[in-house]
Image (spheres, rainbow, N blue to C red):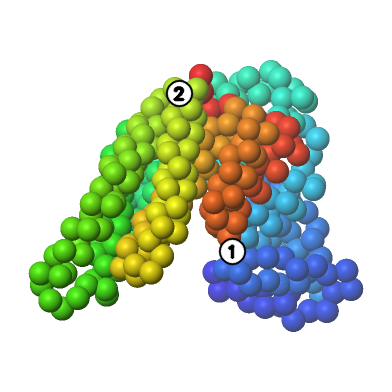
């Protein structure tokens, strides 16, 4: 590793007329002239010195882009790039390379599907599951939810899927607990010191919100049911039902907040509930979109992303998914995952 670091320092300090930035996995960059890109990494030269920067030391997306520009025009080469993209979580890019390989040599792809793809999918799912376990251990519940959802929408036919479903149960329990704690804290700021008056306020708010709380639980149950469903056709439909229920709850909360203007305690409570409903609606829309994306229904996937962004134009989760759908529609290709 010392040799590698010193080699990069040479590249960084060298003046190369046709140099370009080589992006590294830690966010830094060095300059050099790219000589070749393949499964071994990027071979770079500067000031008369040449070294190969290994794939693990490169920014994965940058490496993919550079490799894709120079990949040999044969099926096996495209499949090697597809494997790297798949292992790096770039599922759309993997599908793109897979489709190109299919056009070049269907027999090579057929053998790949039989000999390599099943193990590759199991391996990727196992790694995602391990990352899910680590996130749960660190109590990084949002990350755990995203990782487990990715397994269940992209790799639902793998051995890791059953444990991913269990992990989502743990995440859901945590989120429910935290959401309730947050609501209690928001209400506590407005409760009068007089115990009797405080109790009256709590009862009044509870009475107004009980119907919505009941609908929230039903929508949450529906979203969880979708993640546990193995049929892709049923899964995307259930996700959309859940998303629409959450969306209706958001509208009802907004209406109730408008009617309750001046009631600071109730309005604050409604705002916290709204945040939860928006988050859950976006998750459901994106999960439905992921299923469409796997089936190469790009317009439907884009519609799901746009529906999520209507709820929150600043949602990073929805924006990232929209970028995936745009890339997928441009490639017009897909890598099947055994869905029916």
Kindly tell me whether residue 151 is visible in this rendering: no
The one of 335 and 73 positioned closer to us in this rendering: 335
148 relative position to 318: left or right: left
Q: Which residue is mark 2?
A: 234
The one of 83 and 146 positioned closer to us in this rendering: 146
Q: Which residue is mark 1?
A: 25
Q: Position of residue 243 (x, y in %)?
A: 46, 40
Label 1 Cα crowd, 10 Å radius (few <14 / some 14-19 / many 20+): some
Label 2 Cα crowd, 10 Å radius (few <14 / some 14-19 / many 20+): few
Say which residue appears at 47% left-offset and 48% top-offset: 251
Kindly tell me whether residue 221 is visible in this rendering: yes
The one of 44 and 28 positioned closer to us in this rendering: 28
Vertical comparison of 141 with 195: above or below? above
Vertical comparison of 193 with 136: above or below? below
Which element type, helix, strand or loop, lies under badge 2? helix
270 relative position to 180: left or right: right
Say which residue appears at 83% left-offset and 69% top-offset: 19
Q: CA distance from mark 1 to mark 2?
A: 39 Å
Say which residue appears at 32% left-offset and 46% top-offset: 212
Q: Position of residue 84 (x, y in %)?
A: 60, 44
Which element type, helix, strand or loop, lies under badge 1? loop
Q: Position of residue 234 (x, y in %)?
A: 45, 23
103 relative position to 196: left or right: right
Residue situated furthest bottom in the rendering: 13
Vertical comparison of 20 with 14: above or below? above
Residue situated furthest left in the rendering: 196
């Amino acid at each position: 590793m010392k040799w590698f670091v010193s080699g990069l320092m040479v590249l960084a300090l060298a003046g190369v007329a046709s140099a370009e930035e080589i992006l590294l996995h830690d966010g830094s960059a060095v300059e050099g002239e790219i000589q070749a890109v393949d499964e071994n990494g990027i071979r770079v030269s500067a000031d008369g010195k040449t070294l190969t920067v290994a794939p693990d030391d490169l920014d994965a997306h940058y490496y993919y882009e550079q490799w894709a520009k120079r990949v040999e025009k044969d099926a096996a080469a495209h499949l090697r790039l597809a494997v790297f993209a798949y292992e790096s979580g770039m599922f759309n890019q993997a599908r793109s390379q897979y489709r190109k390989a299919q056009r070049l040599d269907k027999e090579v792809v057929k053998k790949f599907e039989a000999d390599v793809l099943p193990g590759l999918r199991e391996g990727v799912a196992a790694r995602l599951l391990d990352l899910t376990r680590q996130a749960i251990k660190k109590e990084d519940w949002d990350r755990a939810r995203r990782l487990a959802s990715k397994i269940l929408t992209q790799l639902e036919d793998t051995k890791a899927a059953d444990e991913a479903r269990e992990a989502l149960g743990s995440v859901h329990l945590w989120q429910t607990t935290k959401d309730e704690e947050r609501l209690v804290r928001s209400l506590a700021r407005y409760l009068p010191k007089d115990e009797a008056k405080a109790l009256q306020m709590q009862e009044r708010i509870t009475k107004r919100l009980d119907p919505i709380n009941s609908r929230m639980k039903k929508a949450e149950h529906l979203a969880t049911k979708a993640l546990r469903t193995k049929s892709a056709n049923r899964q995307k439909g259930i996700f959309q039902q859940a998303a629409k229920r959450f969306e209706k709850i958001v509208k009802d909360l907004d209406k109730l907040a408008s009617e309750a203007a001046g009631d600071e305690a109730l309005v604050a409570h409604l705002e916290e509930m709204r945040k939860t409903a928006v988050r859950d609606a976006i998750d459901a829309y994106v999960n439905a979109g992921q299923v469409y994306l796997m089936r190469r229904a790009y317009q439907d996937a884009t519609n799901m992303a746009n529906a999520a962004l209507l709820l929150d134009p600043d949602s990073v989760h929805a924006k990232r998914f929209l970028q995936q759908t745009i890339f997928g529609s441009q490639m017009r290709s897909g890598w099947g995952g055994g869905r029916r």
